[in-house]
Image (spheres, coloured by chain):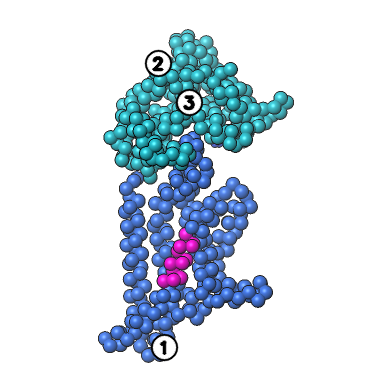
Chain colours: A blue, B cyan
Amino acid sequence: MDYLIQIVPAVAAGLKITLQIFVITIVLSLPLGILMAVGRISKIAILRKTMYAYIYVMRGTPLMLQILFIYYGLPFIIDGFTLPAFPAAIIAFVFNYAAYFAEIFRGGIQSIDRGQYEGAKVLGMTYIQTMRRIILPQVVKRVLPPVSNETINLLKDTSLVYILAMNDILRITRSIVQRDFDTTAFLVAAVFYLFFTFILTKVFGYLEKRYAVYDE
Amino acid sequence: MSFIEMDHIRKSFGNLEVLKDVSLHVEAGEVVSIIGPSGSGKSTFLRCLCQLETINSGSIVVDGKTMASTPAGSQRAVYAPAADVRAICRRMGMCFQHFNLFPHMTVLDNILEAPRVVKKMKTEEIMPQAEELLKKVGLWEKRDTYPSRLSGGQQQRVAIARSLAMDPDIMLFDEPTSALDPELTGEVLRTIQQLADENMTMIIVTHEMAFAKEVADRVIFMADGIIQEQGKPEDVFEHPQNERTQSFLQSMLRF
Ligand SMILES: Nc1ncnc2c1ncn2[C@@H]1O[C@H](COP(=O)(O)OP(=O)(O)O)[C@@H](O)[C@H]1O
Ligand SMILES: [Mg+2]
């Protein structure tokens, strides 16, 4: 028990990095993902193809590789351009998760009936107005379950930043275990992750309930 | 000069020519019904007028303003600048077979949405008209309901009110009752009849022969992308001249 009281605050110190990466990635990658999804289905071929290639590459290579590339690889490409670990991690996470969200949103947008666009058009709405007011709000309802999944994945993926020697929950936990030859810290870390997964599940459950006021 | 002048409209989808030189002039306040077998191009024709499809050649002029025209000797229609086309289309409302209401908005918000977004009006400014329209179609009590909770007939009446909220001068209907149970068509047809009584200019594609006869000033029979016959309802229905019209009306009678 004494041991627990001693290590819980130590592990909790890793929360800051874990949650910072999580929150910043969500806040930036969701809107970016929506924009990419719209580009991915655009009538402008170059935009559509670029987005397709981009999403293919980001989903087809490990996030770990992308983190390493941005941190260690960029300085070789852009001469002498180095990023500190935190922004490098954020960039990798945001651009990776935006690609996943883009695919989710693309599927959602394409699942909306053509009649919705036509109904909006004959009322005089522009494409952007139609997207913003008519299509995307309906897409949100449809993509909540996959977005919820992806968000929980992100929470766990944040642990990848250990590779850049950033002290998130998992890296701190590992060093405690190595120091004390005691695996209790792993359990503590697991409880932290489970706690935040629980909160996320609740948040998405609430959103799904809110969107349940209408059927399609 | 007629209110709506569509001349020599041609429209193809790939190799399939759907409209083969169709011309139709509609006077202000006139109600025109288009009948004909399915696949004959009726929907496409309406959709060309409200810009859901672009024509290949021909011309569309509404209230003296040219939306599209085809220069002499050319095979391709040229459209007016986008802003002009938009302005012309703003004068038309369209109701679809499947209503196309916005499912994520209440009945009232469905009505308010376009005036708010397109005309930048404030909710308070539109409310009196929204109330009047919803009362007119008998659905004011349902204003806070979502469309999926309404019957098909109620949904179509909301769709009509939604179009009217943009103050159109022309209403287009594409088989407004085809998706409805038979006992629900009456309430929608009455609403359309009421618009006719108020001298709304309308083009109505319908399979309801009795209604077409009742409401229309003129009936158009279309088949194979061509207007085969047109005239006063009593003439077209009682004394069809064209063989295609005769056999079509025969087949409709069997229902
Ligand atoms: N977007 C489209 N792409 C390809 N073919 C179409 C399209 N819309 C309609 N058609 C075809 O055009 C023909 C006429 O269709 P339509 O105008 O819907 O006829 P109607 O309303 O009289 O039943 C049909 O053969 C239909 O399959
Ligand atoms: Mg049709």
Which amino acid, mark 1? Gln
Q: CA distance from mark 2 to mark 1?
A: 89 Å
Residue, far left: A1
Callout 2 touching callout 1 (CB < 8 Å): no
Judging from the image, mark 3 belongs to the subunit labelled B
Task: Tell whether B167 sits left or right of B2.
Answer: left
Could you tell me which residue is drawn at 43 percent across and 73 percent down? A18
Looking at the rendered structure, whether the residues under marks 2 and 3 are on a common chain is answered as yes
Foreground tag (3 vs 1): 3
**Where does residue B81 sit, x and y in percent of width and height?**
62, 35
The residue at which mark 1 appears reads as A178
Could you tell me which residue is drawn at 58 percent across and 56 percent down? A52
Few, some or many residues within 10 Å of mark 3 (<14, 14–19, 20+): some
Front residue of B172 and B39: B172
Looking at the rendered structure, whether the residues under marks 2 and 1 are on a common chain is answered as no
Could you tell me which residue is drawn at 54 percent across and 21 percent down? B3
Few, some or many residues within 10 Å of mark 2 (<14, 14–19, 20+): few
| Picture quadrant of residue A17 | bottom left
Front residue of A76 and A177: A76
The residue at which mark 3 appears reads as B169
Residue A21 in the magenta stretch? The answer is yes
Quadrant where the N terminus of chain A is found in the figure: bottom left
